[in-house]
């Protein structure tokens, strides 16, 4: 048996016996707080958007009135909220798409790493995030932003922001 001749046990016993005789108590473990364990119980309850339906959502053809940079700003701001992880956000985004569609964190990371108003416009993350944030805006009763109104004026005649042709092709 390896270590059978070691003095570790006897030295440890002597150390703790001296502490016991000196009246030193063993430190007690602190109870873990919900924030330290990584649970989202301290986070504010999420707004329920499951009952909200946008025109064209059933067919996956919601007209988009935000560009990719605006959606990236909204995503980055949303991910800083307590209790929101990339994985939970990807699940929320996937819920905006057809059943069975999943969004991987790599897809989210790839979309977030792009730069430019049209870069990433064909990504399912872009479409799902727009639908998610639009439903969230409606559920919270917030008005449309100035940028959103400008985009509506420009893109309504064309059926919304282009999500078919990649940003590098026009």
Image (tube, rainbow, N blue to C red):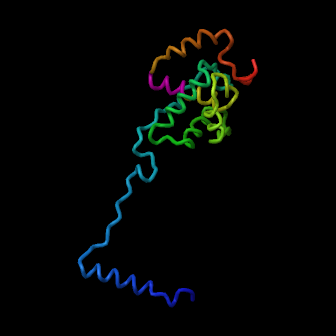
Using the rendered view, name the quadrant where residue 21 is placed: bottom left
Residue furthest to the left: 23
Between residue 58 and residue 32, name the one nearer to us. Answer: 32
User: Is residue 137 on the magenta stretch?
Assistant: yes
Using the rendered view, name the quadrant where residue 163 is placed: top right
User: Which residue is depicted at the point 59% across and 39% down?
Assistant: 90
Compared with 18, 78 (above or below) is above
Residue furthest to the bottom: 5
The part of the chain drawn in magenta is: 133-141
Compared with 43, 6 (above or below) is below
Where in the figure is residue 1, as x and y percent of width and height? 57, 89
Where in the figure is residue 164, as x and y percent of width and height? 73, 23
Q: Quadrant of the C terminus?
A: top right
Between residue 48 and residue 124, name the one nearer to us. Answer: 124
Using the rendered view, name the quadrant where residue 156 is placed: top right
User: Is residue 111 on the magenta stretch?
Assistant: no
Between residue 82 and residue 17, name the one nearer to us. Answer: 17
Left or right of 101, for residue 52 = left
Where in the figure is residue 103, as x and y percent of width and height? 65, 39
Between residue 105 and residue 113, name the one nearer to us. Answer: 113
User: Which residue is depicted at the point 52% across and 89% down?
Assistant: 4
User: Which residue is depicted at the point 64% across and 19% down?
Assistant: 63
The overriding secondary structure of the stretch rendered in magenta is helix
Where in the figure is residue 142, as x and y percent of width and height? 45, 21
Compared with 55, 34 (above or below) is below
User: Which residue is depicted at the point 68% across and 38% down?
Assistant: 101
């Amino acid at each position: 048996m390896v270590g059978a001749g070691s003095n570790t046990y006897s030295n440890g016993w002597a150390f703790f016996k001296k502490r016991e005789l000196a009246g030193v108590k063993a430190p007690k473990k602190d109870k873990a707080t919900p924030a330290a364990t990584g649970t989202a119980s301290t986070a504010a309850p999420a707004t329920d958007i499951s009952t909200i339906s946008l025109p064209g959502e059933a067919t996956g053809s919601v007209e988009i009135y935000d560009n990719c940079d605006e959606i990236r700003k909204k995503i980055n701001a949303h991910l800083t909220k307590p209790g929101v992880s990339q994985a939970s956000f990807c699940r929320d985004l996937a819920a905006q798409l057809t059943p069975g569609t999943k969004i991987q964190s790599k897809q989210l990371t790839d979309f977030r790493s792009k730069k430019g108003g049209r870069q990433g416009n064909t990504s399912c993350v872009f479409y799902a995030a727009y639908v998610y944030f639009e439903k969230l805006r409606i559920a919270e009763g917030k008005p449309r932003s100035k940028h959103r109104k400008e985009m509506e004026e420009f893109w309504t005649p064309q059926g919304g922001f282009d999500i078919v042709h990649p940003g590098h092709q026009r």
